[in-house]
Image (cartoon, rainbow, N blue to C red):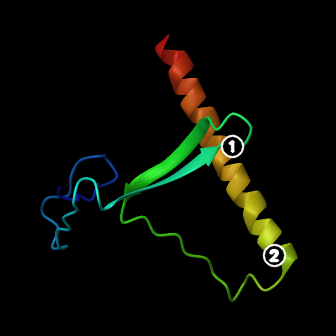
Amino acid sequence: MRKVHLKAGGKPNVSSTEGIVQFRERSDYTIFQFIEPRTQNVLGYIGGYALDFSFNLEQIKSTERMEQLLEGMKGLFRKMIAEQILRQVDKK
C-alpha cells in the first residue's frame, strides 16, 4: 500500500519529493475502539496506518491542564461526530 499526501484541493501530490511509505495491509493497521461497557457494542473507532498521538508534556504538568486537553479533545470529537451525522442525513 502506498501513502499519498494530499494537497489543499484533495488531489494527490505526485510531484512531491517526499518519500513513499508502504504498509502491510493488516498487521500495520491500528484500531482504537470506543466500547460501551454494558453491551460491549462498538460506538466508534479510530483506525489507520502510522497513527501518531503526541502530547506536549511540558505544557501538561497538572491534572487541571490534562483536563483542559481532554475537554478540547471532547469538543473536537463532538464536532466530528456531528459532521458525520449531518452528512448521513443529507444523503437520505
Residue at position x 64%, y 34% in the image: 82
Of 83 and 62, which appears nearest the observer? Answer: 62
> Which quadrant is home to the N terminus?
bottom left
Outermost residue, right direction? Answer: 64
In the displayed structure, would residue 80 be above or below residue 50? Answer: above
Q: Earlier in the sequence, mark 2 or mark 1?
A: 2
* Residue contact at pointers 2 and 1, CB within 8 angstroms: no
Picture coordinates of residue 44, whole percent (x, y): 57, 41
Lateral position of residue 19 relative to residue 48, left or right: left
Q: Amino acid at mark 2?
A: Arg
User: Element under label 2?
Assistant: helix
In the displayed structure, would residue 53 be above or below residue 91? Answer: below
Q: Amino acid at mark 1?
A: Arg
Residue at position x 68%, y 58% in the image: 73
Q: Which residue is the site of mark 2?
A: 65
In the displayed structure, would residue 60 be above or below residue 44? Answer: below
Picture coordinates of residue 88, whole percent (x, y): 52, 22
Residue at position x 81%, y 67% in the image: 67
Residue at position x 58%, y 25% in the image: 86
